[in-house]
Amino acid sequence: MSVVYDRVALIGLGLIASSMAHAMRRSGLAGEIVGTARSTETRDIARELGFCDRVVDSAAEAVKGADLVVLAVPVGAMGAVAAEIAPELAQGATVTDVGSVKQAVIEAVGPHLPEHVHFIPGHPLAGTEHSGPRSGFAELFDNRWCILVPNGSDAKATARLTRLWEGMGAHVDVMDAPHHDLVLAVTSHAPHLIAYTMVGVADDLSRVTDSEVIKFSAAGFRDFTRIAASDPTMWRDVFLTNKDATLEILGRFTEELFALQRAIRTGDGDHLHDYFTRTRAIRRGIIEAGQDTDAPDFGRSGQHDKA
């Protein structure tokens, strides 16, 4: 692969940003990678690991001369970061992000950016339950999807960012922001909320069963609730900024759940069998699409970096 961007600035150095750095290095996609994070500890770890060419102390310093700026901070912090970096953004630079919601990012970031930059929100559909700079690895995006929201940006700038993500191993699709937020409410946001809820139920029950619910958790419970170990700051921001779509999907989920409750209560085996048959076919479709395999876990553990 050839260099796509001469200088990439990573604002925030958690799982996604550190994995981007590793993936860009693997394929030679960036001439220079400059990183920064809010906490001194995170910056020191990034320097120790060496996945950035330079680690600097502020976002404003990091973006100087960069032709790509990646906002990899919680959604709730993006507006303030955009305001900080705006005066230092280079002519023609592209600003993107990796947040799980898109309309809220556009509303928070867009007003701060000067007209001479391209703003192309993005969302790589990849991750693990780990966080922090130690958790990143180059293979995170392999055969995963990255959604871009051009938001009226120049087609050449979007094509260039697409080349970067494809060079990092991802497939790229384009959506508008409201559609993205609805799709992700179904495929990610509501499932995470349900997983958090199930862990809460198990914790409540463990108080009256001498912790047996936790101790004897079967594979189904462990696999289903693995995502409840994800970063709480990020997910707090996701639910607060994608509220309408998430509530709509939770309402539909509740209706489906009530129907299953009724079938169990009335002994309607045909309904249960038909429902499980249909949903199993959907699950098999996910497997056939190659999206069922978790990203490799190489035993990395991370510390959350809030900015």
Image (cartoon, rainbow, N blue to C red):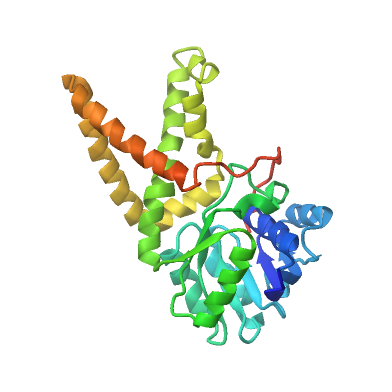
Give the side of residue 250 with respect to residue 105, left or right: left
Near-viewer residue (15 or 31)? 31
Above or below for 294 versus 202? below
Near-viewer residue (6 or 80)? 6
**Count of numbered circles in the view:** 0
Above or below for 279 versus 75? above
Residue 100 visible at all: yes
Dividing the picture into quadrants, the one containing residue 85 is bottom right
Q: In which quarter of the image is the C terminus?
A: bottom right
Q: In which quarter of the image is the N terminus?
A: bottom right
Residue drawn at x 67%, y 55% as measured from the top left: 19
Near-viewer residue (109 or 158)? 158
Above or below for 155 versus 194? below
Residue drawn at x 46%, y 42% as measured from the top left: 287
Give the side of residue 26 with respect to residue 307, left or right: right
The furthest residue to the right: 48
Residue drawn at x 74%, y 68% as measured from the top left: 34
Residue 13 visible at all: no
Dividing the picture into quadrants, the one containing residue 231 is top right
Residue 236 location, x and y as percent? 48, 49
Give the side of residue 112 with respect to residue 37, left or right: left
Residue 77 location, x and y as percent? 55, 62
Residue 125 location, x and y as percent? 52, 54
Residue 136 location, x and y as percent? 69, 50
Near-viewer residue (162 or 211)? 162
Residue drawn at x 53%, y 45% as measured from the top left: 232
